[in-house]
Image (cartoon, grey):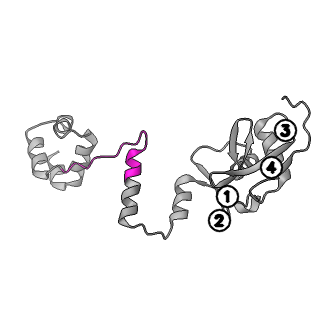
Amino acid sequence: MTVKIQKEIRFINECGCIVVEKDLAAAILWYQNRPTLSEKKIYMHGRYPAVSIGDVKIHVHRLLMQYWLGIKLPFNASVHHLNENKLDARKENLSIFINSAHNSNHNKGKVLDKEHKRKISEANKNRKGMKMKKKHNIPTYQLKDLLNFGFSINYIASLYKCNWSTIKSNIHENKELLEGE
């Protein structure tokens, strides 16, 4: 169904989202850049209220922040709810953070037990495209001998099956090896 003339958008708020509907309607039209259906549902998608725009589901708070700023937010930007209420998408309750700052803000003061840390580590290892650095314990005396024999850093790295930067950092961590360079 093609909509040629934009009618006023009415919202069916299934999740109790606190939002200025006039702003949300304007944001949808800005995002879509063409007329849309006159009835839109606000529903929970994951843990946040969302709307569908075409075949895209977008969280209400993120859509509104993009509209107010006039740009599409990059992937590493988070929209934070100041009062911690995920249903509250009013302008005065939202701010923008870089993901790392946003996550550290939420995790401030939390203490994780060893089991929880182990699970996080395991989940990170299983992430697609994630490479966990293997710790190489290279004895200083062996590294010193190999350098004194005139072996290159690349050759030493191939012996220990590690990256050359690992060897370089081991050299810089040990002052006695720096003197030999």
Q: Earlier in the sequence, mark 1 or mark 2?
A: 2
Q: Which mark is residue 95?
A: 1
Residue 133 sits above or below residue 100 on the image: above
Which mark sits nearer the N-terminus, 4 or 1?
4
Magenta-drawn segment: 122-137
Task: Name which residue type carries label 4.
Answer: Leu
**Sequence-first tag of 4 and 3:** 4
Considering the numbered disc 2 on the image, is that residue within a helix, a strand or a loop?
Answer: loop
Q: Find disc 2 in the rendering and name its residue.
A: 84
Residue type for callout 1 = Ser
Comparing labels 1 and 3, the label whose residue is closer to the camera: 3
Main SS category, magenta section: loop
Quadrant of the rendered image containing residue 1: top right
Query: CB of mark 2 within 8 Å of CB of mark 3?
Result: no
Q: CA distance from mark 4 to mark 2?
A: 20 Å
Q: Could you say which disc has been placed on residue 37 in the image?
A: 3
The CA span between labels 2 and 3 is 31 Å
**What residue sits 67% from the left and 58% below the top?**
95
